[in-house]
Image (tube, helix red, strand yellow):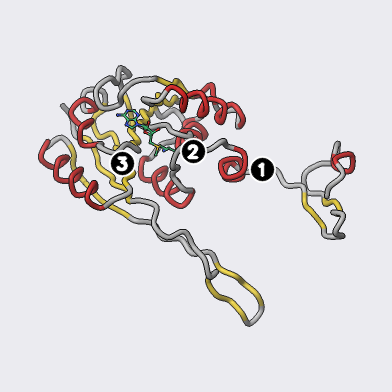
Amino acid sequence: MIKIDDVVGMGFGNSVKLSTNVNAYLLKPTLIDYLVKGFRRVTQVIYPKDLGLILLLSDIGPGSMVVEGGVGTGFMTAVIAKYVGDEGHVYAYELNKDYIEVAYRNLKLVGLDRRVTFRNKDVRSEVEDTNIDSVILDIPDPWNSLNNLAKVLKPSATLISFLPTINQVEKLVIHALNTKLFVDVKTYEVMLREYDVKKDAVRPKSRMVGHTGYVVFMRFLKN
Ligand SMILES: C[S@@+](CC[C@H](N)C(=O)[O-])C[C@H]1O[C@@H](n2cnc3c(N)ncnc32)[C@H](O)[C@@H]1O
């Protein structure tokens, strides 16, 4: 148990004794803390191990204009919104209205809602935003979106698709290459192992997240 009165007014970096006599530390929550413990989860989500690679591959940074397809819970949306800064923007497409409500509240929790415009539309055929630097997709059939997205992407934009099965990866890659609109197509899988580190006993933890999905990366040429 923790007495809330013991904590109110205390700054980050301090500690407080629990009723079990164990020390608890007051640390400023990171975005991952909010995602994992604060966000209401209504769909499958992209895990932090994959979010990190997707962010770097996409080259999203301050000022980036991004289209996201398949908002779901909003894990990916929050990460993109954090890095586009106030000068950039996320146009977040989602078919399910109820998920948009949840994602909006999740984004508000971390103060990033103003950097996102939610669109209750199909990312495969109804994208209306132009001059896009990067597209991030987490939908079952991304190959059906490529021709339309090509109309809104800036030359040399990045496109990333997160897919749970290798069958979807094959279909997307073959389709993308056939369009002749995308090049530099690469597929990745991230495996992350945390370690227990004690003197004379350093080893990987016994449990780890097994499979999540594959990350397919490509660059758009021009129309
Ligand atoms: C797995 S969830 C996305 C989770 C999200 N990436 C996250 O990290 O929280 C996939 C979402 O894509 C949405 N979706 C599927 N096809 C879509 C489409 N064509 N356009 C827009 N949204 C779509 C579904 O309704 C679902 O909410």
Q: Is mark 1 within 8 Å of ligand 1?
A: no
Residue at the far right: name it.
5
- Which residue is pictured at 66% across the width and 79% down the height? 199
Does dot 1 land on a helix, a strand or a loop? loop
Q: Which residue is mark 3?
A: 161
Badge nearest the viewer, 1 or 2: 2
Q: Could you tell me if residue 128 is visible in this image?
A: yes
- Report the amino acid beneath label 3: Ser
Question: How many labels, in total?
Answer: 3
Q: Are marks 3 and 1 in contact (CB under 8 Å)?
A: no
Mark 1 or 2, nearer chain start: 1
Q: Is residue 38 above or below residue 123?
A: below
Q: Which residue is mark 2?
A: 75
- Report the amino acid beneath label 2: Phe
Q: Are marks 1 and 2 in contact (CB under 8 Å)?
A: no
Q: Is residue 185 above or below residue 103?
A: below
Q: Position of residue 25 (x, y in %)?
A: 77, 52
As measured in the structure, the alpha-carbon distance from the residue carrying label 3 to the one carrying label 1 is 28 Å
- Which residue is pictured at 30% across the width and 17% down the height? 128
Q: Position of residue 148 (x, y in %)?
A: 21, 25
Q: Which residue is mark 1?
A: 29
Q: Residues within 10 Å of mark 1 (few under 14, many from 20)?
A: few
Residue at the far bottom: name it.
200
